[in-house]
Amino acid sequence: MSDKIIAMLNQDLEGEHAAIIQYLVHAYAMGEGEMACEIEAIAREEMRHFDWLAEAIVGLGGVPSIKRGDMRTGGTAVSNWMRNDVKQEVDAITMYEEHIKAIDDRKIRRLLERILSDEKSHRGSFEHFIDKAKREGAKDLRGSRQDSVTKILDWGVEHEYTVVLQYLLHSYLTPNDEPKEELQDQAINEMQHLGWLSEELVDSGGSPRIEHTDINQSRKTADMLRADIKIEKEVAAEYDRAAGEIDDAGLKRLLLRIRDHEVYHIDIFSDLLAEEEG
Ligand SMILES: [Fe+2]
Ligand SMILES: [Fe+2]
Ligand SMILES: [Fe+2]
């Protein structure tokens, strides 16, 4: 039975993952404003769902999936995007209802019911946003700029998304409390970088493409930390190099600020690795 529950929860997890990225794509494309903020807040609730489901999967002896379910990111008008977000919620509601019926475990059912009530509330919000988008004339602010600046930002977005997933996976799989907490914390920090770079990309006339590269799937804490240190060292150097190439003072500052965070992550992970090897 436990295997079946794990499979269902992983399906739910993949759905949450798709919802998070779909909503972020929409929020970033709309730029600043009340509706974009509300959509980002919904994406943050999906992140909490993601976290609860992943922990439940680990609790049952499973491995959280880092695959992403199907997204609906097409459509030119913002009102169409909101309609797609309603559809995403309706699919989630249907799936949670099925899984609640199929699962005996009282605690897991309670968790899914808790998430389900959020999804119903999200569905209502997105339904409301369909008209609001039309009324307020919400626009797609993304452009088609592609040059050396957008190339750096694209690279950054891809990198940040990769490490968000990698550090989350590592935090779920390590049995040790301290690395678990630090990896979770740094993943949240990388999520912040992902947002800054995506917003910067839209501001500069580009269009964020939120895809990731390979995720390190080590099972031993020391191996995880070694992989995490390696990637941090590479990207800290790359942010440093990129900052030197950029003329725009604001963007240069942003890249250097992110670089400083990555250098901090190297220190944190190195200390953890030393303890692990101690
Ligand atoms: Fe959710
Ligand atoms: Fe939702
Ligand atoms: Fe980062």
Image: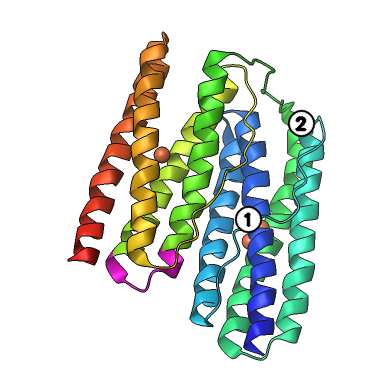
The x, y position of residue 99, in whole percent, is 73, 78
Is 80 covered by the magenta stretch? no
Measuring 50% from the left and 76% from the top, which residue is drawn there? 58
Q: Nearer the viewer, mark 2 or mark 1?
A: 1
Is 174 covered by the magenta stretch? yes
In the image, farthest residue toward the left: 278
Q: Quadrant for ligand 2?
A: bottom right
The x, y position of residue 211, in whole percent, is 62, 41
Label disc, if present, on residue 17 of the rendered structure: 1
Which residues fall within the magenta stretch? 171-178
Please tell me whether residue 217 is drawn above or below residue 125 in the rendered image: below
Secondary structure of the residue carrying numbered label 2? helix
The x, y position of residue 227, in whole percent, is 39, 52
Q: Establish whether ligand 2 lies closer than 8 Å to the Cβ of label 2.
A: no
- Say left or right for 178 vs 150: left
Q: Amino acid at mark 1?
A: His
Q: Amino acid at mark 2?
A: Arg
The answer to the question of whether label 2 and label 1 lie on touching residues, with beta carbons closer than 8 A, is no
- Say left or right for 48 vs 268: right
Q: Which residue is mark 2?
A: 135
Secondary structure of the residue carrying numbered label 1? helix
